[in-house]
Image (cartoon, rainbow, N blue to C red):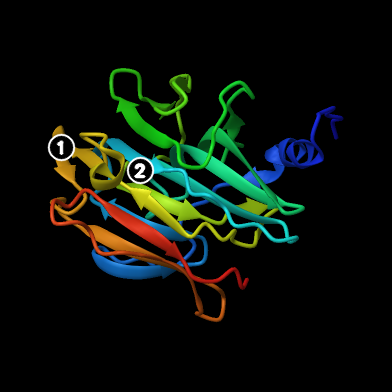
């Protein structure tokens, strides 16, 4: 337990809860291509053989959360792994609605280790354009994440970190409802989350490097559209089709029902 003194109650509540969060692997049956459903993810994954993913690059616009009195959450990230294995190397933005207001924070995570949050000076606002990359450094056997808020002008980089059991068999561009204490949270109403060049004007994003060759999501060997559902199968969030250039899509909020 730690005490945090802050000017605004909402921000204090948000920061105090950080260490409880977990951004987890895909929690649903998996297939090699086409579409699937998940209890916690919505977006796209590229799925290949173990050891083939070298890097993933992405960009998105931070959505404006529509908050009621309920406490709800949504995370937006780019990463490697988690589709076919139990690790995830990822970086992104977490949003929380509490007491009718939204707050946002940047983070990286080498799951199952806990997420690491950017300093409070790295401010994230709705409408900001984000850039992220996750890279495997083969010479050192470790992963590095880089997250940039292009609008605000800051960059947040992880140390090169070895992740035991990382398969390097998938790359992802995801909207997630995270877990607290092992239980999935209620999904925040994020409206639409826009990913990729067509929306962000950031080139060479929503691409994956496989065995040294760069592919867009749409041109990759196997890509999967992932719809988030609750445990009764009702849709919570759904991805659009990919753009004609294979780089861009959006995820639409449908329901917060857990």
Tell me the residue at 16%/36% (across/down).
Answer: 211
- Helix, strand or loop status at disc 2: loop
Quadrant for the C terminus in the image: bottom right
User: Which residue is tagged 1?
Assistant: 214
Q: Quadrant of residue 36?
A: bottom left
Residue 195: percent from left, percent from top? 33, 48
Q: Quadrant of residue 188?
A: bottom right
Assess disc 1: are there few (<14), some (14-19) or many (≥20) residues with their C-alpha within 10 Å of its C-alpha: some
Tell me the residue at 64%/48% (across/down).
Answer: 96
Drawn side of residue 186 relative to residue 138, left or right = right
Tell me the residue at 70%/61% (across/down).
Answer: 68
Q: From this viewpoint, is residue 100 visible? A: yes
Of marks 2 and 1, the one in the foreground: 1
Residue 104: percent from left, percent from top? 60, 39
Is 83 above or below relative to 131? below
Residue 60: percent from left, percent from top? 37, 43
Tell me the residue at 46%/53% (across/down).
Answer: 175
Camera-side residue: 30 or 34? Answer: 34
Drawn side of residue 154 relative to residue 219, left or right = right
User: Which residue is tagged 2?
Assistant: 167
Assess disc 2: are there few (<14), some (14-19) or many (≥20) residues with their C-alpha within 10 Å of its C-alpha: many
Drawn side of residue 57 relative to residue 162, left or right = left
- For the image, the number of numbered tags is 2
Quadrant for the N terminus in the image: top right
Residue 155: percent from left, percent from top? 45, 21
Identify the mark at residue 169; answer none if there is no mark.
none
**Label whose residue precedes the other's in the sequence (2 or 1):** 2
Mark 2 vs mark 1, CA separation in Å: 19 Å
Circles 2, 1 touching at the beta carbon (< 8 Å): no
Camera-side residue: 244 or 144? Answer: 244
- Helix, strand or loop status at disc 1: strand
Q: From this viewpoint, is residue 52 visible? A: no
């Amino acid at each position: 337990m730690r005490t945090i003194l802050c000017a605004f109650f909402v921000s204090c509540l948000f920061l105090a809860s950080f260490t409880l969060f977990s951004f987890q692997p895909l929690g649903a049956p998996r297939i090699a291509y086409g579409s699937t459903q998940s209890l916690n993810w919505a977006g796209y994954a590229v799925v290949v053989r173990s050891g083939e993913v070298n890097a993933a690059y992405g960009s998105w616009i931070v959505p404006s959360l529509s908050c009621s009195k309920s406490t709800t959450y949504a995370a937006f990230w780019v990463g490697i792994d988690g589709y076919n294995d139990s690790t995830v190397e990822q970086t992104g933005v977490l949003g929380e609605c509490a007491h009718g207001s939204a707050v946002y924070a940047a983070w990286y995570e080498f799951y199952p280790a806990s997420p690491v949050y950017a300093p409070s000076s790295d401010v994230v606002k709705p409408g900001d354009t984000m850039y992220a990359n996750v890279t495997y450094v083969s010479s050192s056997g470790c992963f590095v994440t880089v997250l940039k808020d292009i609008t605000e002008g800051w960059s947040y980089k992880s140390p090169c970190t070895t992740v035991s059991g990382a398969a390097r068999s998938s790359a992802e561009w995801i909207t997630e409802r995270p877990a607290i204490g092992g239980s999935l949270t209620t999904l925040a109403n994020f409206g639409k989350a826009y990913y990729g060049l067509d929306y962000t004007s950031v080139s060479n994003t929503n691409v994956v490097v496989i065995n040294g060759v760069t592919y867009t999501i749409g041109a990759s060997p196997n890509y999967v559209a992932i719809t988030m559902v609750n445990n009764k199968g009702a849709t919570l969030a759904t991805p659009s089709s990919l753009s004609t250039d294979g780089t861009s899509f959006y995820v639409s909020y449908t329901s917060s029902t857990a």
